Image (cartoon, coloured by chain):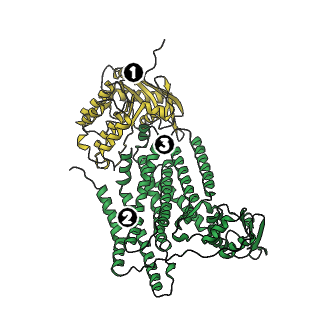
Amino acid sequence: MLARELAIALRSRLAWLQAALSALLIGHGFVLAVDLYSAGARSAQAGTLMAREFDPLLGIVRPTLGGLYLAVSLLGPLVAARPLAIEKERRTFHALLLQTASPARLTGAKLLGALLSAGLQLVAPVLLLLLWLALGGHLALGETLVPLAGHAFYILLIAALGTACAAWTRSLAQAATTALVLVAASWAIDAAEGFAALAWLGRAFDWSVTTHLGPLEHGVAALDAGLWMLCAAGGLFAAAWIGVRSEGAPVRRGLALAAVLAGTAGACALAHRLPWRFDLTEAHRQSLPPAAVAGLRALGGPLRIEVYLDSDDARRRQLEADVLAKLRLARPDLRVEDPLDGREAPAEGERDEGYGRLVLHVGAKHVETYSTSRRELVTLLFEAAGRPPPDWQQPEYPGYPLVIAGRARTALLLLAYAGLPGTLLLLGWLVTRSKRRS
Amino acid sequence: MSAEPTGLRVEGLSCRRSGRWILDRVSFELRPGEIVAVIGPNGAGKTTLLEAVVGIQRPAAGRVSFGGRALRRLGERARVFSFMPDDAEPPAEVSVAALLDHAVRYGRPPPGLAEALRKGLDLQPLLRARGGELSRGERRRVALFAALCTSRPVVVLDEPLGTFDPLQLLAIPEVLRDRARAGASLLLSVHQMSDAEKIADRLLLLRAGRVVAAGTLDELRWAAGRSGGTLEQVFLALLQAEQARSEHARP
């Protein structure tokens, strides 16, 4: 079955076309990122910017993978649904099911085909990052592999989504449309942050894929994020398996699907609670200073922070990204409570005086502050514990400014806009062309 | 005392779709080594019957059993049936060689069968071609191989003879008969009466989802009140008689 599925996945013109289109999109993101990075690096050479501000993870890797995310979201569902959907369109599905006698094996083989088809999109970013290295750029292995792994998990999730949609629909068009609607639902949750009409979706923020890709894209190996995507993919695989099993009354199959989706939601929620995250960035840039980390770990008693900020308050998001995420890296047991989340949204001017305060608990002691400064909050935690504030010395991150100009830039432009998409198209043509005897 | 049931038995099979009975209490038996052709006008329910027998269509009522054991689950049906749907297209991207290997792997045919079918269906020249490069007749030969190359006791073929030229129509029925001689039971739907007459041991005539007549050609002739004639003549006579009966019964 493997040879059959490999052929269906890799001898498909659609798969190579999406890989080439994706390469074009990713290449464009890469070129823009390199140009911006180079422009900044020129300023660093002129002394107006510090060299240590030049972080290839944020400047090159993330924008390049941003193009991959967009391409996988838009094109992935189509190629991921195809291996199973075309069996239905070609009327071979039931004969194949009867032949193999195993819905699980058939679903697994189709998921593998979907993964291979959608996975072709990973070729372009990997080659472009290698090109960055070849041009003299710097990439730290750990912090580059973590976001790549995150996007590989996302491709797996899209492959499982496409397969599940194909299992429950009758044609490729229906399957791809359903999968795209579900991807758009995840985007709608993201959009809720800045769009009042979608504010009610803010509570579903934990169900957005970008919530889980975020820490991985910053070089933090977040087990919760990886496991969340694996659980979601596993649940979608189970949903596909139920869809492929053609026996049983529709109501019974519907109930089984509902049970699987509920189980998946539970597993994802549990995965999201896993506290273990590891900062794999060079010089631990995502972490607090080493002395603060060591000191926080040595603090006795549980740590708890009450945040009196509404969920749509920009300060709360800034606090989460800038302070709480770093505190969790040092103290995975940190509990953050948002007491205002349960209340009705207040009208403008109705917020009470205590709005905006943070209550920091260390064991039985607590302190209050209105500051959201990282250093201030860490210092207050130590004060509450009766300890002196830690040394705030951060390890030196040298930064890697690099200007890509002249011939190197021309070569980069040619490769990103023509060489890579063209090579993928050529490879696709070679693999898919007809070799039929006359 | 009745003999132990050995073959396929279909009892009172009914299928309903959009408020209409597509199959209405269809019953028949298929013995080992026998070829039964399901015939009938367009829309008679031939394809639905075959799909309901192998489990693709959910019947509203009825029972399908083999060797006296009811076939309900996929695993039970997969041990008994091999199926070729009508108009199925093998995957366009996969080579014929890979498709045949796949069929052999999952069909687990008895020794020598794969080679005999490859020869009988003249597939050797097609091995390097891909599914999408095949003509309709070639695709049908590959699909026939996939369905016939098996050790499963009942082979169900939907319109296996519909796309072949007269020359191929000399060879293909012989391939099917060889499988039956080797012990497989074949249940076919056949549109052309001349093809059905050539190949079937027994015939099942359907009209509007109901069995009009069943038996050997001689038995159908007897049912039609004729002493001779081709299957086509018998078929028309039986259908006209059935139509007259229906009109007579209508108030």
- Is residue A85 visible in the rendered image? The answer is no
From this view, report whether residue B34 is shown above or below residue A111: above
**Which residue is the site of mark 2?**
A20
Circle 2: residue type: Ala
**Which residue is the site of mark 1?**
B223
The reply, left or right, for residue B65 in relation to residue A349 is: left
Residue A262, position as x, y percentages in the image: 62, 49
Mark-to-mark CA distance, 3 and 1:
49 Å
Circle 1: residue type: Ala
Which quarter of the figure has residue B137? top left
Mark-to-mark CA distance, 2 and 3:
32 Å
Q: Earlier in the sequence, mark 2 or mark 3?
A: 2
- Helix, strand, or loop for circle 1? helix
Of labels 2 and 1, the one closer to you: 2
- Helix, strand, or loop for circle 2? helix
Mark-to-mark CA distance, 2 and 1:
66 Å
In terms of depth relative to the viewer, which is nearer, B178 or B124? B124
Q: Report which colour depicts chain A.
A: green
- Helix, strand, or loop for circle 3? helix
Which residue occupies 30% across, 26% down? B230
Residue B172, position as x, y percentages in the image: 27, 33
Q: Report which colour depicts chain B.
A: yellow
Which quarter of the figure has residue A21? bottom left
**Which residue is the site of mark 3?**
A104
From this view, report whether residue B181 is shown above or below residue A126: above
Q: Quadrant of the N terminus of chain A?
A: top left
- Is residue B114 visible in the rendered image? The answer is yes
- Residue most extreme to the top: B1
Q: Chain of mark 1?
A: B
Q: Which mark is residue A316?
A: none
Circle 3: residue type: Ala
